[in-house]
Amino acid sequence: MPEQRTNKDEVSILAPLREVTNGDRLLWAILVGLVGFGGYAYYQQWTSGLGVTGLNRPVYWGVYITNFVFFIGLAHSGTFISAILRLAGAEWRKPLTRAAEAITIFSLPFGVSSILIDMGRPERAFNVIFYGRFQSPLLWDFTAVSLYMFSSVVFFYLSLLPDIALCRDRLTEVPAWQQWMYRLLALGWQGSRQQYHRLERVLDGMAIFMTMLVVTVHTVVSWVFGMTVQPGWHTALIGPFFLLGAIFSGTAAVVIALAVLRRVYHLEAALPVSLFNSLRKLLIVFTLGWLYMMVAEYLTTFYGSLSDEMAVFWQKFTGDFAWMFWLMVVLVFVLPLIIYVFLGKDRIGWMVTASVLVNIGMWLERYVVIVPTETRPRLLYELVIGTYSPTWIEGAITLALFSGMILLYAVFTRYFPIVPVWETAEVVDEAVETTPRRRWGIQRAGTK
Amino acid sequence: MEQIVSAISGFFTDAGPGGVVVLAVIVLASFVYFVVIRWILQADEDELSAPPKAGRDFRQRSFNK
């Protein structure tokens, strides 16, 4: 027998799914155009080779690898909000889990694409399968990111399943193909007590697994750099540093996404200001955590004063990359901390402003980690100061990647509920059960 | 003994085994997720076919406490 649930915000959550507006079509068309422009740029790169980019000897990794690390970092938002906070029993997270998980799902493919785009011969990616050897961190990366992407899709889909069934049952006026899609994806979900119970158990179990994966993935991503003896990369701190940065930028991205969804889809009731206040506290902690990591990293390097390390160190602090480094510090730490602490409470506009700054700053941070050390080669035959200036090709492809991610996100939110209806609903049947336990889920001690 | 060491070393350094492990991980994950999704969706059939048991209900309640 289906479990009866009611959600007072159901109508407003499902409203955006009932109609695609002209504004949507215009936005999608613009984004498709930008993706197409990036496709043209990639065609140029494909036919002419990587020479059309700013990549050269000895700077082999630039904007594309920066994008890779950034997108993988963004992807951590969903797992952090959904899995880690789920394990912590943070009930306030429920309305924003899907918006966060969607960022994970739609940013991961573009992270993986960035790697392929960076390869002069992308078809050689299959060599990882045919000739993979476990002494290579690239293979660890391939394994971890593949499993993370696959598991994230399953985790996302499972938590979406009851709401797809809800769409199947409620949205009877939408086009036939849309109804057919809901019927197909709902997998015959009936919404019985037992199904909900099993779903909750699986999601709880997967939350533990996903938490382990999220730590593993970004640590392994950092090891692609850290396992080399390159100054600035070869440090044990690089794993935790990357992980914290990933969760930081991902959580900031969730703030941006939530604010836009709230405004565009009129979800003020389903996404109250209190959610932003909770995220604000987390972001203050992450901002300070990021400063801690920065100080630990650079103070250790400075006291060691190894000549190779110091060349890169001064390059960032006072050299060619100083403007970018200090701009990054202002964008990631100084301004966001001021805004989050003094201006962010109950003010969504300020929260979004700070979060945008954080994400721009975190992209610059990835760039500053990756590029400067490459411009200081230490091999005899390469003892020339390297330079790197990205070309329009890299700019256009980067724009296309971000546009593609936004496009997928925007389309998704028009066809699926972006606020989980079933997770934020209350069970109304079973008079005996409703008092101590509002629904079939884990009601941990200490949670309300 | 040398053969064992060589086999272990070869696993990490030879071209090929790494790719097999990647595929094995993905295939295993696919199998586990398939089974899990089936298990969730079959809940209705199990509920209807099996008579209600006090013990099972008790376990569910205590799980939710």
Image (cartoon, rainbow, N blue to C red):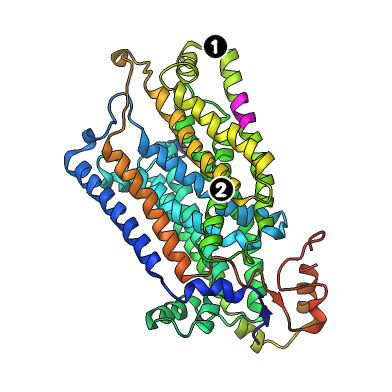
User: Please, is residue B32 above or below residue A169 in the view?
Assistant: above
Residues in magenta, as a range: A291-296
Secondary structure that dominates the magenta span: helix
x 32%, y 40%: residue: A395
User: Please, is residue A131 above or below residue A51 in the view?
Assistant: below
Observer-nearest residue: A214 or A24?
A24
Q: Name the residue under label 2.
A: A352
Determine crowd level at label 2: few under 14, some 14-19, many 20+ residues with C-alpha closer than 10 A. many
Position of residue A350 measured from the top left corner of the image (x, y, whole percent): 59, 46
Position of residue B47 measured from the top left corner of the image (x, y, whole percent): 66, 84
x 63%, y 83%: residue: B46
Q: Mark 1 points at which residue?
A: A305
Observer-nearest residue: A118 or A143?
A118
Left or right of A111 in this view: A97: right
Q: Can residue A131 be seen in this view?
A: no
Look at the numbered disc 1 and give the secondary structure of its residue. loop
Left or right of A339 in this view: A392: left
Left or right of A102 in this view: A383: left
Q: Which amino acid does label 2 sit on?
A: Val
Splitting the image into 4 quarters, where does residue B13 fall? top left
Look at the numbered disc 2 and give the secondary structure of its residue. helix
Residue that sits furthest to the left in the current view: A47
Which quadrant holds the C terminus of chain A? bottom right
User: Please, is residue A123 above or below residue B58 in the view?
Assistant: above
